[in-house]
Image: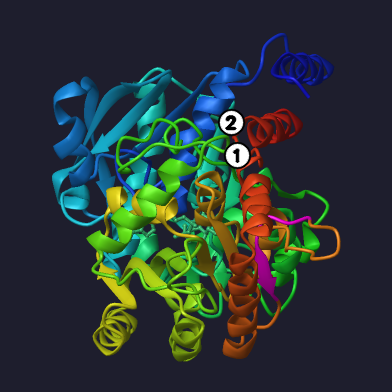
Amino acid sequence: MTRQTMKRRLLEAAAAKGRGVLPSALFAAAECAPLSKTGGLADVAGALPAALIDLGFDCRVITPFHRAAKEKYGARTEHVCDFNIGLGWRSQYVGIEKLALGKTAIYLVDNEYYFGSSIYWGGADEGEQYAFFQRAVLEAMPRMGFIPDILHCNDWHTALMPMLIKAQYYGTPLGNVKTLLTIHNLHFQGKFDFQYIQGLLGLDGGLYSPRFMEAFGCANFLKSGCVFADGLSTVSPTYAREIQTPELGEGLEGIFHERQEGLKGILNGIDKRHFNPKTDSRIPARFSAADLSGKALCKTALLEELGLEPGFALGSDPGAESNRAAPVIGMVSRITAQKGFDLVLAALPGLIDLGYRVALLGAGDPELENAMRAAEAKYKGHVCAYIGYNEGLANRIYAGSDFFLMPSRFEPCGISQMLAMRYGTLPIVRETGGLVDTVTPYNQFTGEGTGFSFAGADADELYSACARAAAVYAEKEVMEKLIQNAMAMDFGFTGPAYEYGMEYIEIL
Ligand code: ADP
Ligand code: GLC
């Protein structure tokens, strides 16, 4: 469908609801690229609103003015307003700054105490950090002169607002705002002591009921959103089905099952302008599907940067002219149990035997970080574990690797595997969530495929998939065909934005 057709259909759908124009939307998220980022939520907040704007929506963003954002963009913001809000017994300052980034207007909620350190405080205080954010967003809307038709909430940090609007803003202009809650990661729900949250936000005691926000003895931010939001979505069709099961429903499967009719699974996209191997200035050489010579340079440079020995592909003759360097598996990831690092560690000796070099970039769980550091020490020259957050290196890994490993135990969508394909790097993924919806496993009979996959969360299965990938790497022509297939995939945000737009209209 062309963008023109999408626009026409959206306007027709709005007209069917008695609207002459498309609804306006405020997109609220705890992080937003390129201002602040720990993972894929920021990628979505940075790219989806712009795609909605391209379809004709007045979509703006609201996000905390985190320290990282202030350092990078502080000089470019414009002061909109400031006021104080009550949070428990305290009165807290809220500044609203505005930043124009491309076509997108981003409102930044400023408060040194809540957003002057890390994006997520962790622990019980994080409840206060994001209770503050949500009260600030609600109180800011009338003051900044933008009360949208749709408030688009994302994850638990913004999931209380649908309930607050219905319970506390009824009869005010905010009471008419419709809400869509998108779940990016069900594992994090924002579970806190009810009295603590009640004290901060003045909640009615009746809300602490299993019908509303109580779950397993806690006040649950995400659950409240799942109950009260007018629309509910998650970030891939497969994950939308999986969260209705006890295995991946994280205790909330009953609600998803009940709301299954309205629960949308809208696949994420990527920011194709920001992540483009033809123009990316953070990689050592540019390349395209038509000319991959730059990708080979990126690989050589990556091996050197990370202190990895080039070696030779298993089975290749070091004397022959056609010999090739060892295959490189890249990983760029938050280091958490979700991402299957335990499987990687268990399979690592086998991957080394297959002749792989492993380039890992990530940060997170200290125990897993240490285990990765130990693996680097043990397999010096074969494994590099760069512990930290580094966007430039991330792109150099996407560009310079042959394969990209994502053995997730669950994966709502996953952005990284799409970025890897964009840079001609074949994903090796576990068949879960959005990884199923975005990666087509190589079929040796038809020649189709954009990567490799395995079903069980099991180190042997991971190893077998990597062995299949190594065999393909040895057949240069097949490998090149798969790279072409992967780079031909269009993971832009226009299609997803159209689906979100239709959802906005549906819940009006
Ligand atoms: P998740 O949101 O679960 O972390 P996604 O695959 O959806 O996983 O998105 C991860 C995003 O964060 C990608 O853009 C990836 O490049 C980026 N990323 C993750 N870890 C790092 C890191 N250590 N350094 C730089 N970028 C990272
Ligand atoms: C979450 C999920 C990831 C998804 C991202 C953006 O962090 O873990 O799968 O791609 O959000 O929606």
Q: Amino acid at mark 1?
A: Thr
Q: Quadrant of the C terminus?
A: top right
Judge by depth and name the residue closer to the eye, 253 or 437: 437
- Tell me the CA gap for discs 1 and 2: 6 Å
Q: Residue 177 in the image: state x and y as whole percent.
A: 58, 31
What mark, if any, has residue 358 been given in the picture? none
Judge by depth and name the residue closer to the eye, 145 or 331: 331
What mark, if any, has residue 150 been given in the picture? 2
Part of the protein shown in magenta = 448-454
Q: Is residue 439 above or below residue 468?
A: above
Q: Residue 456 in the image: state x and y as whole percent.
A: 68, 83
Q: Residue at x 68, y 47 (%)?
A: 485
Q: Is residue 446 above or below residue 410?
A: above
Which image quadrant for residue 7? top right
Q: Residue at x 73, y 58 (%)?
A: 440
Q: Residue 474 in the image: state x and y as whole percent.
A: 60, 68
**Horizontal arrangement in the rendering, residue 348 relative to residue 465 (left or right):** left
Q: Is residue 288 above or below residue 40?
A: above
Tell me if I can see residue 469 in this picture: yes
What mark, if any, has residue 179 been given in the picture? 1
N-terminal of the two: label 1 or label 2?
A: 2
**Horizontal arrangement in the rendering, residue 82 relative to residue 123 (left or right):** left
Tell me if I can see residue 201 in this picture: no
